[in-house]
Amino acid sequence: MNADLRELYQDIILDHNRHPRNRGRLDGSHRQAEGHNPLCGDNVTVYIQTENDRVTQVAFEGQGCAISTASASMMTLAVQGKTLSEAEKIFREFQSMVTETGDAQPHPDLGDLEVLAGVREYPVRIKCATLPWHTLHAALTGGGEVSTE
Ligand code: ZN
């Protein structure tokens, strides 16, 4: 990755960390789940509202590092309006993007989320990036609590 691109990616992550989108509790949310990443101390609660198998609203709350907050913020934008199976597909694609080894593969379906591909180089940070996604997955599949350990 060249330096300019790295800087651009950094800017997007910092922007989402400073101004997280869809942060807050959803009142009367149909499903929610809590996630913890003890390694870093990230905590996140994901709320989703669904209608006819479609995610109509998604929000998150919690305290975490810049990577987990930015990932949660971008996740809410990525899955809003998607069907449950589309949201699951994005979850799986994100998961494979940050854990795949070898040369980085393009993930055009992920849009801005591609900026988080850089965490592949920092194994400790992978859990920060995937925490909101595992929590989303738990919320989509029935709620409860997840831990990255
Ligand atoms: Zn973290």
Image (tube, grey):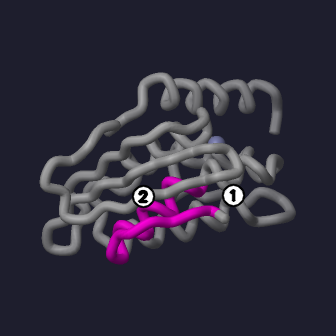
Question: Foreground residue, 111 or 119?
Answer: 119
Question: Foreground residue, 52 or 142?
Answer: 142
Quarter of the image for the N terminus: give it: top right
Classify mark 2: helix, strand or loop. strand
Question: In what quadrant does ligand 1 lie?
Answer: top right
Q: Residue 98 bears which disc, if any?
A: 1
Disc 2/disc 1 C-alpha distance (Å): 21 Å
51 vs 83, left or right, is left
Magenta-colored stretch includes residue 145:
yes
Ligand 1 within 8 angstroms of badge 2 C-beta: no
Q: Residue 34 bears which disc, if any?
A: 2
Q: Residue 50 location, x and y as percent? A: 19, 65
43 vs 9, left or right, is left
Front tag of 2 and 1: 2
Classify 31 as above or below 65: below
Ligand 1 within 8 angstroms of badge 1 C-beta: no
- Measuring 80% from the left and 53% from the top, which residue is drawn there? 123
110 vs 28, left or right, is right
Quarter of the image for the C terminus: give it: bottom right
- Measuring 61% from the left and 39% from the top, which residue is drawn there? 67
Instruction: Report which quarter residue 141 is drawn in.
Output: bottom left
Instruction: Report which quarter residue 118 is drawn in.
Output: top right
- Measuring 32% from the left and 72% from the top, which residue is drawn there? 84
Q: Amino acid at mark 2?
A: Glu
CA neighbours of label 1 inside 10 A, class few (<14), some (14 to 19), many (20+): many
Question: Foreground residue, 36 or 140?
Answer: 36
Instruction: Report which quarter residue 107 is drawn in.
Output: bottom right
Magenta-colored stretch includes residue 12:
no
Q: Amino acid at mark 1?
A: Val
Q: Residue 109 location, x and y as percent? A: 50, 59
Magenta highlight range: 130-148
